[in-house]
Amino acid sequence: MRVALMTEYSMVGGGESNLLSLAGELDKSVKVTLFCHGIVKDRAEERGLDVVEFKTEKRWYRSIPLPVFDRELVGKLNSFDIVHAYSVNILPLLFFVKSKKVWTNHGYWERPFGLRAFMIDKIVDRVICVSTDVNNSAEFEESKKRVIFLGTDFKIDKGRGGGFNKESVEIVCVGRFQRIKGQDLLIDALKELSKTVSGRITVRFVGDVNANTPEDLEFKNELLEKAQRAGSENLSILFEGFRSDVEKYMGAADLVVIPSRYESFGMVAIEALACGKPIVAPDIGGIRDIVDSEKVGLLFEAGNVADLKKKIEYAICNYDSFSRAASLKRAGKFTIGEQAEKHIRLYRELLNG
């Protein structure tokens, strides 16, 4: 079986990181070629994956796809058994492709409903939804949809096993700087919390901004100014930038906080659990598929700074209520091997008719 995986994105965020891991895992069983460019292409080549240089741009007019017949691209893609698009903007290019076509729907922002869903339905053979929440928003026949959770290739149990000291708490927050990721909410919550706790809190933000996006650059500047005002004797706020060794930061932390206003899935959550770390995350979207017990984490009302502060404070004061074993067990349900196996099963179903 030959599979073409396609993405338009050049930067490596959570979705692209998962795509690279998935491609590597699938390549153990089937022949995978990744159509990509930029840093994604560089990372794919470092993994020894077969790569084709590929770029595209938005080809939708509102809910209407703008098909383009690229003879060379169509010819290449027709040589594959499965063509799998990891982005909605790839789909107009697949209009003339005869191979079986799959699209992974990552969230509501791809607008998998109404007229757009009707048009997508004419292009692809199957739609993969990354969470129950995404599946519920995707307006396709149930027989056409499949929920397949994303997986992590973190080796289970990389974190330290104990030594929690409530007088010196280490928190890590991982994610690209975007308003939807809610780093501003975390700074506000910790500023208030630092006024009432006796110990010292250190929070490390691992991630940065896409320098090509003005609104994200503006948000980063807002975060830096907010952090400067919030820092105190009891609160240290550190910005670590993009890191390839995220698991090292998670392993050294006591608590992983995901302050997002929305998460369609929550890759950071399963990476934290794989490190045996408790999490505080929003009660919204795909997070609900991951956090199944207060032994592994606490959920706060998305966007509510007061509730976020309350849950972090509870986590610190009741740290012994979390179970490292429960976190590791839960992480085992979201491995890259499990994700790849379900993809291969879906591909074979399509090919066998």
Image (cartoon, helix red, strand yellow):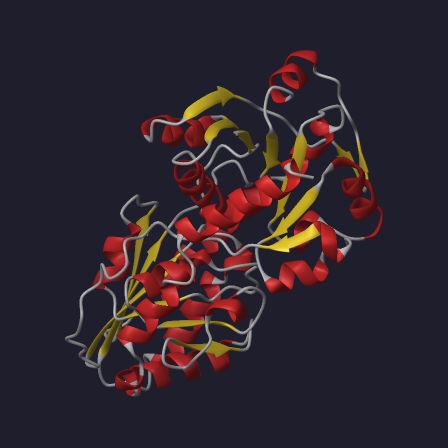
Residue 102 falls left or right of residue 290: right
The percent position of residue 153, horizontal first and vertical second, equals 35, 49
Quarter of the image for residue 147 reads bottom right
Kindly tell me whether residue 230 is visible in this rendering: no
- Examine the rendering and report whether any part of residue 317 can be seen: yes
Front in this rendered view, residue 96 or 107: 96
Instruction: Decide: is 258 above or below 244.
Output: below
Quadrant for residue 326, please give it. Answer: bottom left
* Left or right, 305 with reference to 59: left
**Left or right side of 262 for 228:** left
Q: Residue 31 appears at what percent x and percent y?
A: 46, 28
Residue sitting at the far front: 352
Q: Is residue 19 above or below residue 183?
A: above
Closer to the camera, 232 or 353?
A: 353
Quadrant location of the C terminus in the rendered image: top right
Q: Nearer the viewer, residue 158 or 233?
A: 158
Q: Residue 283: horizontal and vertical position, in percent?
A: 54, 74
Vertical position of residue 244 compared to residue 320: above or below = above
**Residue at 57% over, 24% down:** 55
Residue drawn at x 55%, y 34% as measured from the top left: 7
Residue at x 44%, y 42% (from the top left corner): 22
User: Based on the displayed image, in which of its 4 quarters is residue 6 positioned?
Assistant: top right
Q: Residue, x 36% and y 86% (percent of image)? A: 314
